[in-house]
Amino acid sequence: MFLEWIKKQGKLFYEIWPLIPAAAYLIGFLIIIGIYLINLSLTFANAGIIYYPTLKTFYDVFSNPKFLHALISTTIFVVIGTPLELIAGLFLALILYKSFIFRNFIRSIFLIPLAIPALVTATLLFILFDFPGGHINHLLMGKYPLFPQLIQEALNWRASEFLALGISMIGKIWRDMPISMLILLAGLNSIDPELFDSAKTMGAGIRQRIIYIILPLIIPSISAVVLLRSIEMWKEFIFPFVLAGKYNLLSTLIESFYNDWGNSYAASVVALIMVFCIIITAYLFILLMEYFKKRILRS
Amino acid sequence: MNIYSVKDKLKKLIWVGSIVFALALILLPLYLLIKYSISDASSINTGGAPIPLWPYHPTLKCYKYLFSDTQFYNVLSNSLIIALLTVIISMILGVPAAYVLGKYKLPGRHLLILGLISVRLFPDIASVIPIAEFFIKLRLHNTYTSIVLAHSLLALPYVIFIGMSAFESIPLDLEQQARVMGAKGFTIFFRVLFPLAMPGLAAAAIYTFLLSWDEFIFAYFLLGLGKITTLTLFLKQKLAYSPPQNLLATISVILSVPVIIFSLLLQKYMAAGITTGSVK
């Protein structure tokens, strides 16, 4: 009996041993990240004295107005950015949904933003939204033919919190919209075309077909986009770092605490809070999507 | 009948207009990036006049300047060395793991896969602090080792995932036929499975290379302003000092070109049907 068990375990080990180095590497680092993040956030340093374990760093971070401001800004960034990315992805997906010549070629072009490094996209926006002489300022000031004048004086995009975070959001949406497009396109392609034909025969218009056929059937894809993109919005670092500078989101506040203030403890606390926000957001979106799904199916 | 044809034409017009708009939205910024990289100073500092949509005197001055700078060669070689070492480590660790997960139906396989990819569920900006502190403790901060190990950590879940699909798509019959003909474990892996999984594994390797090549967050926190500078760090350093926009655009183009080219190749590899007709 025992020998059989040993033999079975030996066979299992023979099968899985190539997996062990990678598993050890990934799980080892995961444990290191978890332990360090918790240990650092429970540490507080004052006048060269280290206190551990303590919640003083949490208290410090929560009472810091910069943190509260960053938390609110990030929440707004997520709440506005996620639906915009969904709309952008849906727009591209609906274009590709119809079968036409060069469809694959255009699909490849639509995927290009994803291939551009985020730092390059941020640099490009840095150049285009330059003050006072960027292309966008000149465009809005009506300096190019066929485009009306919308502003009198050039806007200093990176000197205003609203505009700086706004262009960060534009960059994020532009770069990531192909991901939303792919997910939604997969959802759209799974709809049986016969459903459309039947609805059309029975006199359903475009609006009815969208509301009663497309929307309920691509709810899973929409949920996936909203969930994944909202998580990405919480995590976003490069665009606000390059374009919004001092106007912090949670991600850039982590960088600021770590590099500018040399405070790895506060940075870890903000990092933990960010992870917590992501988990809460994911949970809330799942609940919300379930609710909408039920309502749509009922209607 | 006539009303329908007008309606159809209008629909078609809206659809074509949408395609043109979407293409402009994607291609125009890229065109402007390339345009800036070949712009002369007078096409950027226009003194209030509209910036031209095509440079007055197109020039490759910035490219020549960068490629005559020895520091830039160091930066390029650093990025290249780090990316290649990341590919080597990720593939050495990832391919055997992908093989096991793709071929054997292990107990608790899904939980195991979740455990392996869960490191990627952490936001980079949240996991970089503990990793930076860990490498500082090991005195590996500002070294090739730290950045290569960190990039491998980022790439490994993708290698396992892509590799796993590549191995899964190879019919089990092939392995069994090879076994019947007397081939042993290593021979089967290297002579039968590995060549068939090659397109998928190549895709994983290219993806890993790209991930490391354009990675910024870990490079910024682990290398900072030390002696090892990657291309993304070089671009960030230049951004901080507000250099001429044409120089920024040129560095951006150099950083993006391999990514775009390899991404197109990656699409091709991903699309390849590798096992069609391999079992008689």
Image (cartoon, rainbow, N blue to C red):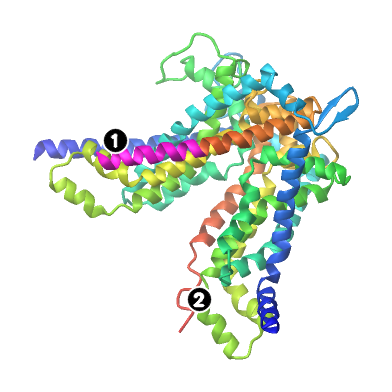
Magenta region's main secondary structure? helix
Mark 1 belongs to chain: B
Secondary structure found at label 2: loop
**Label disc, if present, on residue A9 of the rendered structure:** none
Image position of A182 (left or right of B255): left
Q: Nearer the viewer, residue B48 or A132?
A: A132
User: Which stretch did the figure color magenta?
Assistant: A283-299
In the image, what residue type sits under mark 1?
Ile
Q: What's the residue at 61%, 35% (across, down)?
A: A276
Secondary structure found at label 1: helix
Percent position of residue A71, x then y: 60, 24
Image position of B30 (left or right of B40): left
Q: Is residue A97 magenta?
A: no
Percent position of residue B114, x then y: 59, 55
Lower sequence index among marks 1 and 2: 1
**Label disc, if present, on residue B171 of the rendered structure:** 2
Q: What's the residue at 65%, 38% (across, down)?
A: B252
Label 2: how many residues lie within 10 Å, few (<14), some (14-19) or many (20+)? some
Quarter-of-image position of residue B232: top right
Percent position of residue B215, x then y: 68, 43
Q: Is residue A297 magenta?
A: yes
Residue farthest to the front, as pictured: A1
Examine the rendering and report whether any part of residue B59 can be seen: no
Examine the rendering and report whether any part of residue A192 can be seen: yes
